[in-house]
Image (cartoon, rainbow, N blue to C red):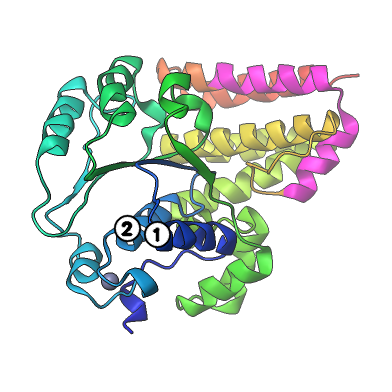
Amino acid sequence: MNQKDIPQLAGNEALLHELRLMRQGGHLPHALLLHGAHGCGKKTAAKWFTMLAMCEDAEHAPCGECKACRLIAEDVHPDVFYAEHSGKRGGFSVETVREIRMQADILPNNGDLRIFLFPDADGMSIQAQNALLKSVEEPPAHAAFVFTAETAGVLLPTLLSRMTVKAVFPVTDAACVNVLKERGYSAEDAEAAVQRFGGNIGKCISYLTDETVRQSAETAAELTGALAVKDEYALLRLLTAAAADRDIFRRTLELFDAQIRDAAAATLHEDLPPLGCDARSASALAMRLTPKQTVRLHEAVLTAYADLDSNVSAVLTASALCAALMNCSAN
Ligand SMILES: [Zn+2]
């Protein structure tokens, strides 16, 4: 058994078990949507599903050893197609979809299946979805379509109703620390990453490998803490420091906005999975705010973001945002 060639999706045992049973029972879905937060392993799950579906050993699929498994592991299987992204929003063009429909009509080279993957389908336009509808509604017996997206709601109901829809979940904090240690990170680094991004393995890895993500996450956490105690001086200092680098500033604002969203969810007593990078300061902020105030804070961050996009100086944006944040959170 060549385990290392099988895509390793941590946690999510129920999902893998269910899909395995489908393969053993001979009724794998012809269209599958895997949805979940950015970084939680949807693409790994999609590749695992591809291997499960095409493996030559039905009993032990995915075996990781047969020809099909090996070709998939190396990303060179002639019957596996990844739709290419195009355009500003990272969608799929109608031409790409037409090309895939054509490919779907062609018989498989090797086994009895051709699989078409649409990773990050969140930006897929209505036109592209409509162009694909017929193939998903009445797929040739040998074709299967696999989509990944952050939320199921991005796809048209007509398309969704033809699909098997499954969620991919982050793992527990402890499991995430273990996965990170297995991948060679120190216990200390693994703990620091999990403190920021919980059981989201993809986000934890980008925190540990991308200095921009790490700095932005630390600043966004500190900003939330400063806002919770209305420390105007700290807010201005943190925002101005982040503004020295436009990239870091943008990322910081994104994560800070996610913190405000988590605080907003807490003020409404909504049990939503967190999107931010520091649960403690988000709940401290939630204690001090009304739901209405969190909306105004969110709008203040969006304004700052729009200013940056229209080339207002980063330092000016930082000081305007600081004033707006103090104003929004005034009693
Ligand atoms: Zn196999």
In the figure, 214 relative to 82: above or below?
below
Give the quarter of the image for residue 60. Answer: bottom left
In reply to whether residue 63 is colored magenta, the answer given is no
Percent coordinates x, y for residue 274 in the rendering: 68, 43
| The C terminus sits in image quarter | top right
The percent coordinates of residue 62 (x first, y second) are 35, 69
Contact? badges 2 and 1 (CB < 8 Å): yes
Q: Which mark is residue 53?
A: 2
Q: Which residue is mark 1?
A: 23
Task: Look at label 1 and name its amino acid.
Answer: Arg
Q: Quadrant of ligand 1?
A: bottom left
Q: How many marks?
A: 2
Q: Amino acid at mark 2?
A: Ala
The answer, for residue 90, to whether it is visible in the render is: no
Q: Position of residue 318 (x, y in %)?
A: 58, 27
Q: Is residue 242 left or right of residue 51?
A: right
